[in-house]
Image (tube, helix red, strand yellow):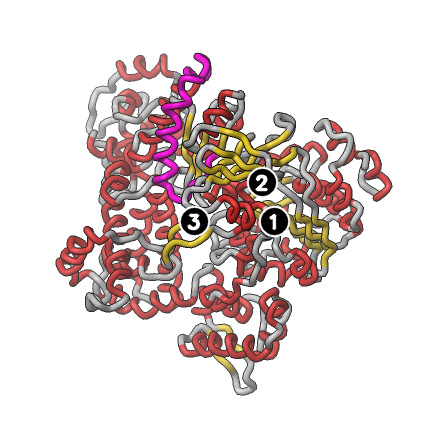
C-alpha cells in the first residue's frame, strides 16, 4: 500500500506529506493491513506485530487522523517514564501541523488541568489512572487511547492499572493496543471488541539459533562453528562492524560481563571512537556505580540495568545508537520498549532466581529480547542467539524459538491492585452500590477470562468489608455506599488502602513521639514502599541497631522465628538509609554502605518522598495536631533535599542542592539574608557556586547579575559606615535599595 493511498480513507494531505518527508513512500504489509482494518473509521484495533515493524507509525497516523476529523484528544500510554520521554521526542515533530504534544509521568496528586491545552498526551498508565481518579475535566475530550506494550496487562506490578484504564474507557473512546508478542491475542481482541492484526513479517529478517560448545545451530538446521566460549559471538559481530546486545539475568552479571567483554573489544576501536568514549566516561559523576561504568565505557562496552541513574541510562542509550558502544550487557528490563535494536542479540541466561528459587524466564520475555535483533536501514538481517549452558540445545530451540508466548492473564487477581481499584470505583467514580460495583467489574478482562460471578462477588465482598471496617467508606440505610474523606483522599493519593491503614493506626504514636527513624520505618513497612534486601551477615548488626533505637520505632520487634522478622529488619535498614540521607551522608558512601546502585537510591528517595507527602495529607484528613503537621512538613523537606535542619532555608534557592547549600553554610552564608548582603565575589569564592548559579539566584530576587568584568570594580567601592550602614555596592541588598 502506497502512502498516497491514505487519501482514500479521508486522511488529511498534511499527514500524508509529513509521512513522505520521513522518506516513507510505501507501508510495510502489516502496517497496510492495520490501516485498512477500519481503525481509521473509529474501530478498536489490537496490532500484534514484531519490533521495528512500524507499530508507532500506525499509531501516529491514527492519532493525527482522529484529531483532524473529530478534534478532542489522544492519550498514548506507556509503561516506563523513559519510554514516555522517547515518544515525546518522536511526536514533537507533528507540532509543525499545529498539534500540541505533552508528556506527564510523575505526581499522583494532581489533576494536571494544564494538559487541557494539548492534543496528544503521553503518560504512564499509573499517571493516567491517577488523572482519572482526580476527574480531570479534559479527560471527557479523550477520543483515542493507545496502549503501547499492551502485553504488560499480564504484568504483576502494573497490569491491573492498565486493565482498569481500558475498562473505564471501553465504549467512551477508541482503543488501539500495540504489542510485539501476545500469546492469546484473539481473546484480548474479543474483550476489547477490537479488530485483530497479527503478523510475523519484519522489515529486517530475523535468524534465530542456539549456541552450545562452539556450535551455533540455526532454526533451519544449519550449523556455524565458533570458538567454544559464547563471548566469541560478540567479538565476531564487532569484527564485522556490527554491535551486540547481551541479555543476562542479574545486574552483577551485566557488570561482570561488560568488564570481560570490554577487555576483548577495546583493541577493535578506532582512535576517534576511543577518544570520544574517554570523553563520555569523564563526563560521568563519580560514585561506586558510575566508576564501574567508566571502567568499561572507555573500552567500548557498557552495562544497562535499573540501578543506573536516568542520566547514565540516557548517555549509554545514545552512545549505543551512535555506534560508539560496541557491546551492551543488560538485564531484561531493557527489552520493555526502549528503542535499542542491535545486529546480534545474545541471550546468555534463560533462568532467573526469585523468592521461589530458580525458574525459567517466560517465553514472552525471551521473544521480546530476540525481537530487538536487526536495525532497520542498517542491517539486512538480525541474529538472535540463545546460549545453552547446562540446558539441551534442542529443548531451548523447542521452547523459546518455536514455542508460543504464554497467555496473558488479568492481574486483578493481585489483592493489592484489586483493593485499590475497588476503593477508587466507590470514592472517585461514583459507584454507589454493591450491584453497581459488580456491574463495572463484569466489564474487566478479569471477569471476561473467568466468567465466574460467584468468585468475583466473593472477592469484591471481602474488599468492601475491609473498606467499611477501616472507615474508608460507609453505607446508608439503603445499603448505598458513602465515600468518606479518608477513603477519597487515599484513592486520590494513589495509595494502597493497606498503606493508608498503617498510617492511620500509627498516627497516635507519631503525635506522641515524632522522630525521623520511626516515621521512615513506618513508610518502609507499607506495601507501597518496597525495602532493601537484608543479607544474612547483616542481620545481627541491624537487630542490634533496632534494639538500640527501640524507643523511636512505632512497632515492637517481632520474634526471630516469626515470618515478619526478616521483613522488619529490611524496614529498619531502609529507614536507616533515609536517616543517613537527611543527615547529609554522601551519595557515594550510601551506595557503598548499603550495597545499592545510584538508581536504587533515588528510587527509594522518590518513593519515600511520595509516601511522606501522603502521610501529611492523610494526617490533615484525620485532624492531627498542628505541631505534628508542621514537624512532618519540615521532615518532608529534609527528605526531599537530603539535608539537616539548618540548610532548609538555603535549599529553597534555585540551583542550590545539598552540596552547594552545605558549602555556603560552612563559608558563613547561613541564611538567605546573608546571601542578600554578600558581594558576588564572596559568593563566587564558595565551592560549587559559579556565575550561572549566581545569575539564577539573583534572578530569583528579580535582579540581573552585573557582568563579570564589573564585579571586581563594584567590590572596590566601599561605603563609609554611618549610624545605619548602607548596603555594600554590588550586593543584592544594594540593588533592592535602588528599587530594582
Q: Residue furthest bottom?
A: 477
Task: Give the secondary structure at mark 3.
Answer: strand
Q: Which mark is residue 562?
A: none
Q: Which mark is residue 181?
A: 1
Count neighbours of disc 2 (C-alpha within 10 A) and say few if under 14, some if 14 to 19, many if 20 or more: many
Q: Earlier in the sequence, mark 1 or mark 2?
A: 1
Q: Are marks 1 and 3 in contact (CB under 8 Å)?
A: no
Secondary structure mainly formed by the magenta segment? helix
Q: Which residue is mark 3?
A: 351
How many angstroms separate mark 1 from mark 2 (CA)? 9 Å
Q: Is residue 428 magenta?
A: no
Q: Quadrant of the N terminus?
A: top right
Q: Nearer the viewer, residue 588 or 476?
A: 588
Q: Are marks 1 and 2 in contact (CB under 8 Å)?
A: yes
Count neighbours of disc 1 (C-alpha within 10 A) and say few if under 14, some if 14 to 19, many if 20 or more: many
Write the residue at 50% across / 52% down: 362
Q: Which residue is mark 2?
A: 371
Q: Is residue 575 visible?
A: yes
Q: Quadrant of the C terminus?
A: top left
Residue 292 x, y percent position in the rendering: 32, 31
Q: Quadrant of residue 232?
A: top left
Q: Earlier in the sequence, mark 3 or mark 2?
A: 3
**What residue span does the magenta drawing correspond to?**
246-275
Residue 346 x, y percent position in the rendering: 49, 36
Task: Give the secondary structure at mark 2.
Answer: loop
Amino acid at each position: 500500500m502506497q502512502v498516497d493511498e491514505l487519501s482514500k480513507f479521508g486522511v488529511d494531505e498534511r499527514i500524508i506529506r509529513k509521512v513522505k518527508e520521513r522518506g516513507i513512500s510505501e507501508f510495510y504489509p502489516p502496517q497496510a493491513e492495520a490501516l485498512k482494518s477500519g481503525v481509521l473509521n473509529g474501530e478498536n484495533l489490537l496490532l500484534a506485530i514484531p519490533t521495528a515493524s512500524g507499530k508507532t507509525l500506525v499509531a501516529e497516523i491514527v492519532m493525527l487522523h482522529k484529531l483532524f476529523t473529530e478534534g478532542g484528544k489522544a492519550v498514548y500510554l506507556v509503561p516506563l517514564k523513559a519510554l514516555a520521554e522517547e515518544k515525546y521526542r518522536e511526536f514533537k515533530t507533528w507540532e509543525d501541523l499545529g498539534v500540541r504534544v505533552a508528556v506527564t509521568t510523575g505526581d499522583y496528586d494532581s489533576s494536571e488541568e494544564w494538559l487541557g491545552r494539548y492534543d496528544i498526551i503521553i503518560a504512564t498508565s499509573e499517571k493516567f489512572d491517577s488523572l482519572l481518579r482526580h476527574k480531570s475535566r479534559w479527560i471527557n475530550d479523550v477520543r483515542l487511547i493507545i496502549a503501547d506494550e499492551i502485553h504488560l496487562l499480564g504484568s504483576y506490578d502494573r497490569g491491573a492499572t492498565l486493565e482498569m484504564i481500558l475498562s473505564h474507557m471501553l465504549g467512551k473512546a477508541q482503543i488501539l493496543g500495540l504489542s510485539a508478542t501476545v500469546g492469546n491475542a484473539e481473546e484480548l481482541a474479543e474483550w476489547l471488541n477490537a479488530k485483530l492484526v497479527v503478523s510475523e513479517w519484519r522489515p529486517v529478517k530475523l535468524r534465530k539459533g542456539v549456541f552450545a560448545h562452539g556450535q551455533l545451530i540455526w532454526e533451519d538446521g544449519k550449523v556455524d562453528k565458533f570458538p567454544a566460549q559464547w563471548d566469541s559471538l560478540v567479538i565476531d559481530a564487532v569484527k564485522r562492524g556490527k554491535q551486540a546486545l547481551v541479555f543476562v539475568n542479574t545486574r552483577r552479571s551485566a557488570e561482570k560481563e561488560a568488564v570481560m567483554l570490554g577487555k576483548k573489544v577495546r583493541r577493535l576501536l578506532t582512535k576517534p571512537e576511543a577518544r570520544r568514549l574517554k570523553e563520555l566516561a569523564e563526563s560521568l559523576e563519580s560514585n561506586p556505580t558510575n566508576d564501574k561504568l567508566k571502567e568499561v565505557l572507555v573500552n567500548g562496552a557498557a552495562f544497562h540495568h535499573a540501578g543506573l541513574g536516568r542520566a547514565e541510562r540516557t548517555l549509554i542509550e545514545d552512545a549505543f545508537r551512535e555506534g560508539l558502544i560496541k557491546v551492551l550487557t543488560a538485564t531484561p528490563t531493557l527489552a520493555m520498549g526502549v528503542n535499542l535494536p542491535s545486529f546480534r542479540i545474545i541471550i546468555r541466561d534463560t533462568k532467573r532466581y526469585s523468592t521461589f528459587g530458580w525458574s525459567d524466564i517466560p517465553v514472552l520475555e525471551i521473544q521480546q529480547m530476540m525481537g530487538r535483533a536487526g536495525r532497520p536501514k542498517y542491517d539486512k538481517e538480525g541474529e538472535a542467539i540463545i546460549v545453552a549452558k547446562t540446558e539441551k540445545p534442542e529443548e531451548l530451540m523447542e521452547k523459546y524459538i518455536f514455542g508460543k508466548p504464554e497467555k496473558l492473564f488479568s492481574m486483578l487477581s493481585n489483592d493489592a491492585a484489586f483493593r485499590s481499584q475497588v476503593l477508587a470505583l466507590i470514592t472517585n467514580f461514583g459507584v454507589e452500590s454493591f450491584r453497581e460495583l459488580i456491574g463495572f467489574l463484569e466489564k474487566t478482562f478479569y471477569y471476561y477470562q473467568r466468567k465466574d460471578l460467584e468468585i468475583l462477588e466473593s472477592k469484591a465482598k471481602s474488599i468492601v468489608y475491609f473498606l467499611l471496617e477501616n472507615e474508608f467508606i460507609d453505607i446508608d440505610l439503603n445499603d448505598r455506599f458513602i465515600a468518606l474523606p479518608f477513603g477519597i483522599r487515599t484513592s486520590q493519593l494513589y495509595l494502597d488502602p493497606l498503606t493508608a491503614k498503617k498510617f492511620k493506626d500509627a498516627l497516635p504514636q507519631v503525635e506522641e513521639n515524632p522522630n525521623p527513624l520511626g516515621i521512615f520505618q513506618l513508610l518502609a513497612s507499607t506495601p507501597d514502599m518496597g525495602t532493601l534486601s537484608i543479607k544474612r551477615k547483616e542481620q545481627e548488626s541491624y537487630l542490634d541497631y533496632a534494639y538500640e533505637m527501640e524507643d523511636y520505632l512505632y512497632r515492637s520487634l517481632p520474634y526471630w522465628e516469626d515470618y515478619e522478622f526478616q521483613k522488619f529488619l529490611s524496614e529498619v535498614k531502609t529507614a536507616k538509609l533515609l536517616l543517613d540521607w537527611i543527615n547529609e551522608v554522601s551519595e557515594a558512601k550510601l551506595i557503598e554502605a548499603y550495597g545499592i546502585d545510584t538508581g536504587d537510591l533515588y528510587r527509594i528517595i522518590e518513593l519515600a518522598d511520595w509516601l511522606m507527602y501522603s502521610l501529611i495529607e492523610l494526617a490533615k484528613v484525620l485532624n492531627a495536631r498542628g505541631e505534628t503537621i508542621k514537624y512532618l512538613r519540615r521532615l518532608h523537606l529534609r527528605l526531599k533535599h537530603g539535608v539537616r535542619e539548618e540548610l532548609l532555608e538555603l535549599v529553597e534557592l534555585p540551583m542550590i542542592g545539598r552540596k552547594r547549600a552545605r558549602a555556603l553554610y560552612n563559608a558563613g552564608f547561613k541564611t538567605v539574608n546573608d546571601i542578600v548582603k554578600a558581594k558576588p565575589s564572596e559568593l563566587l569564592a564558595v565551592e560549587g557556586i559559579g556565575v550561572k548559579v549566581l545569575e539564577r539566584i539573583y534572578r530569583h530576587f528579580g535582579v540581573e547579575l552585573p557582568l563579570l568584568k564589573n564585579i571586581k570594580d563594584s567590590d572596590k567601592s566601599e561605603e563609609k559606615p554611618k549610624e545605619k550602614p548602607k548596603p555594600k555596592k554590588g550586593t543584592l541588598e544594594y540593588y533592592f535599595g535602588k528599587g530594582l
